[in-house]
Amino acid sequence: GAPAYTRPTNLRRVTHAVQLFALLLFIVLLLFAALITGLNSFYQKRILPKLGAAQPVQAPVTVQPVVPAAVKVEVPAELTDGLTTAREQITQLQKQIDALRESNVTAENRLREMSERLAAQQRAAPAPTVTPTDVGAASEGQVAAMIPAVSETNKELVLLKDRNRLTEYADTAIATGSREALDSLITYLLDKDYAHLEHAVRAEIQRVYYHLKFTVRIDPSYTMPVNELFKDPAIREESDLKTEKLIELLADQKQDWQVRLRAAFLLGGRRTREVGDALVKAIKEDPVLDVAKEAQFSFEATMKHKFLLLEIPAIEQWWKENSQLSSEPLTKQQAAEKKKAPAKN
């Protein structure tokens, strides 16, 4: 059962794989070199001569734009003369328009001054009686000089001027609380010469009243600087002010309007004749509408009676009929101290 031949252990195995691989690698390298040589020969013989023979690229040619020559148009002499005449006429018309505008402004100013002067004279004194002799004594030229030329344009300008003036009064009354501006509107309303502006005046007055009723110009957290107003150490807060002091502050128009407004507010609820008189006086005379409004609110809250805003005649009439009041009641602070004090047996 033993093999016929047994290879000795010290005999090396002979293989040709390495020699075969080296031979194949050598052959591949030879082929690759031949390919490179062929491509280089082809480039040198076929491609390079054609590249050398190619023409160089020429620079782009700049084409100058063709400017057409000016064409001389011959204008007929009649047309040139007509244009010159038209230009002169336009210049003259512009001068006439400027002169008319200046005359309209002058007539407007004269008309406004005359209207204001006549209105002032009618309020100051009764109208003078004019006799036929006086009319005959005045020449027609004097009468024509006194009466400016009134056109529809001037009427519109005067109307626009009056409307702007009414709006300015209302804006001043709203922005600064000026009673004088509101009184000017009321004067326009009562003046018969401005009856054609009645609706405009009423609209501006209602605009002022609406602002006063629904707008507050004072800071809600404002309190009177009592330490600066009074050097009395017993007065430390607003609640320490008695009725007499508040009435003095309300009547003193040299004080800041916010101080007077706050005094009017603090007088609310003190149902006495002196307080009612002070509040009614502030409603009628205080130059700041915000103070007058606050005085009316305090008056209404104290007397338990409502009025239209700044309806001064109705307020005066009602107060005249209902001014019989009792003596001064206790202030809120005094009433609180009285409740805290122990009852006497």
Image (cartoon, rainbow, N blue to C red):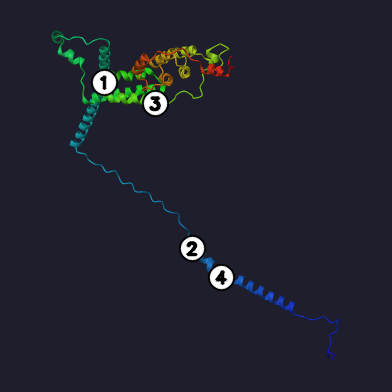
Left or right: where 284 falls relative to 24: left
Q: Quadrant of residue 102?
A: top left
Left or right: where 165 falls relative to 291: left
Q: Earlier in the sequence, mark 4 or mark 3?
A: 4
Tag shown at residue 42: 4
Report the residue at 26% width, 12% height from top: 121
Residue position for label 3: 211
184 versus 45 height, above or below: above
Tag shown at residue 194: 1
Q: Earlier in the sequence, mark 1 or mark 4?
A: 4
Q: Earlier in the sequence, mark 2 or mark 4?
A: 4
Q: Earlier in the sequence, mark 3 or mark 1?
A: 1
Pair 3/2: label in front: 3
Q: Are there few (<14), some (14-19), or many (20+) residues within 10 Å of tag 1?
A: some
Q: Is 198 in front, or is 265?
A: 265
Pair 4/3: label in front: 3
Residue position for label 2: 54
Q: Earlier in the sequence, mark 3 or mark 2?
A: 2
Q: Are there few (<14), some (14-19), or many (20+) residues within 10 Å of tag 2?
A: few
Point out residue 90 in the picture as x, y percentages from the top left corner.
23, 30
Pair 1/2: label in front: 1
Point out residue 72 in the picture as x, y percentages from the top left corner.
25, 42
Q: Quadrant of residue 184?
A: top left
Tag shown at residue 219: none
